[in-house]
Image (cartoon, grey):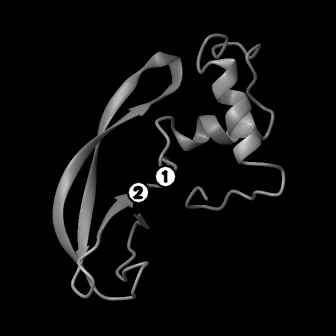
């Protein structure tokens, strides 16, 4: 995975060339979902494929990063108005365990 504007392969440092687009489902506030097009790039050196991830999505997560960050930082709980039943409490606990207090969110989400 690469962030917007990155042009070097994270594995070998080779040049990345546009390959195609794929759809990804992202869960947002109020139980809504949206389809997001992610660009995929292929390394000219090693042949590996990398997806360009926008700032509002964390790698390997279905939910928007704003929601995950809110849960980890303690602003959103299962009692927070509008989030009472979304996401589930186990998911929120898992996020808190994975992104411990040592973890610092940067502009690109990780």
Residue placed most toward the observer, 92 or 47: 47
Which secondary structure, mark 1? loop
Q: Determine whether label 2 and label 1 are within 8 Å by CB.
A: yes
In percent of width and height, residue 48 lies at 28, 73
Where does label 1 land, which residue? 59
Q: Is residue 53 above or below residue 97?
A: below
Residue 35 point in image, percent of width and height? 29, 35
Depicted 100 relative to depicted 43: above or below: above
Q: Is residue 50 above or below residue 91?
A: below
Query: Which of pointers 2 and 1 indicates the residue nearer the eye?
Result: 1
Residue depicted at 38% across the width and 25% down the height:
33
Q: Residue at x 68, y 23 (%)?
A: 90
Secondary structure under the numbered disc 2 in the rendered image: strand
Task: Say few, some or many: other residues with alpha carbon within 10 Å of mark 2 (under 14 / 14 to 19 / 20 or more).
Answer: some
- Number of numbered markers: 2
Quarter of the image for residue 79 reads top right
Give the CA distance from mark 2 to mark 1.
7 Å
Where does the C terminus fall, quadrant-wise?
A: bottom right
The residue where tag 2 is placed is: 53
Left or right, 87 with respect to 34, comes to right
The earlier-in-sequence mark between 2 and 1 is 2
How far from the left and from the top, in percent, is residue 101?
84, 50
Question: Residue 19 falls in which quadrant of the image?
Answer: bottom left
- Name the residue at 42% across, 55% down: 54
**Camera-side residue of 98 and 78:** 98
> Does residue 40 appear left or right of residue 53 in this picture?
left
User: Where, quadrant-wise, is the N terminus in this rendering?
Assistant: bottom left
Taking the view exactly as shown, the residue that stands out farthest to the left is 20
Q: Residue at x 38, y 73 (%)?
A: 5
In the rendered view, would you say 37 is above or below 39?
Answer: above
Q: Which mark is residue 100?
A: none
């Amino acid at each position: 995975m690469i962030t917007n504007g990155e042009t070097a392969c994270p594995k070998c440092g080779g040049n990345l060339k546009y390959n195609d687009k794929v759809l990804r489902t992202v869960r947002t506030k109020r139980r809504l979902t949206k389809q997001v097009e992610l660009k995929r790039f292929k390394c000219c050196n090693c042949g590996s494929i990398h997806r360009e991830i926008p700032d509002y999505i964390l790698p390997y997560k279905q939910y928007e990063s704003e929601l995950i960050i809110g849960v980890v930082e303690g602003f959103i709980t299962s009692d927070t108005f509008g989030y009472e039943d979304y996401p589930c409490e186990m998911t929120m606990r898992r996020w808190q365990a994975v992104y411990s207090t040592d973890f610092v969110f940067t502009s690109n989400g990780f």
